[in-house]
Image: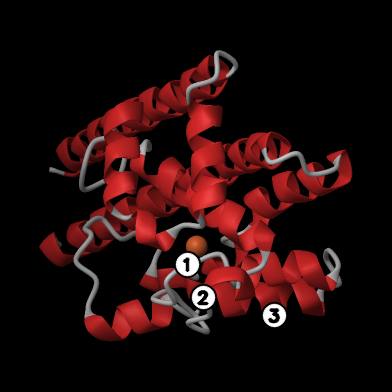
Amino acid sequence: MLSDKQELLDLFEIKSAFKEDIVDALNHGRLVSNLAYCLARELSYPEEFCHKMGDAGMLHDIGKLQLGEYLYGRRTNALKIEEIKYVRMHPTLGYKFLTENNIGDENFRLFVLHHHENYDGSGYPDNIKGDDIPDGSKILRVCDVYAALTSERPYRPAFDKNTAMELMIDEVKNFDMRVFLAFMRVVHNDDFAEIEEYTESINRKVIESRKDNQEEIRLSSICEE
Ligand SMILES: [Fe+2]
């Protein structure tokens, strides 16, 4: 009986974790989308390009959906080496998915393919550097890192805006300086309060839903006893 109960509890936890991760993915996509749109505007791109960046922000991690159990339900940050290799396939999987489903034009799909490339060539999947990286990918790179740092994670609390920016300055070699400086202006603009509020509301919901999940797991455990 003990093993049945344990199996049910394990299943329940996987289900909760999966749900939490899907919600995280959607929240992250929306946040990157907003940031990418604002950053593109700050860089004076035409409105059509800014909207394209909003869409790319929403879809940049679409390849992660194909990583299934390697990502979803993970409650720690300790990825094994072979898992890191697998996770690093997500930009290519995303590009493939967008191409197969005829989503966006080729430029749009290349933005997604290269959103983890670093300016100094240390990124992935193709280790391209400098201006070989598409502009849209440079924008996504900055916004993605900022969104990740300022979001609650299962293994660490969210960093505040200033700490996130300091951490990014430490890693500035990863970013195109023109794009990064424009992002600093976006972050220090009065309008940014709206995005900060949105980020905080997501973080509050994540913390609350985690508490609810813990409570449901505890209750189901008591009922089974
Ligand atoms: Fe990504």
Badge 2 local density, few (<14 within 10 Å), some, or many (20+)?
some
Badge 3 local density, few (<14 within 10 Å), some, or many (20+)?
some
| Circle 3: residue type | Lys
Numbered disc 1: secondary structure: loop
| Residue 5: percent from left, percent from top | 20, 57
- Tell me the quadrant of the picture where the N terminus can be found: bottom left
In the image, residue 5 sits, relative to residue 116, either above or below, namely above
Q: Which residue is mark 1?
A: 119
Q: Are the two marked residues, 1 and 3, in contact with CB atoms closer than 8 angstroms?
A: no
Spatial CA distance of label 2 from label 3 is 22 Å
Spatial CA distance of label 1 from label 3 is 23 Å
Say which mark, if any, is on residue 129.
Answer: 2
Mark nearer the N terminus (1 vs 3): 3
Q: Which residue is mark 3?
A: 96
115 relative to 41 in the view: left or right? left
197 relative to 217 in the view: left or right? right
Q: Are the two marked residues, 1 and 2, in contact with CB atoms closer than 8 angstroms?
A: yes
Numbered disc 2: secondary structure: loop
User: What count of labels does the image hold?
Assistant: 3
| Circle 1: residue type | Tyr
Say which mark, if any, is on residue 73.
Answer: none
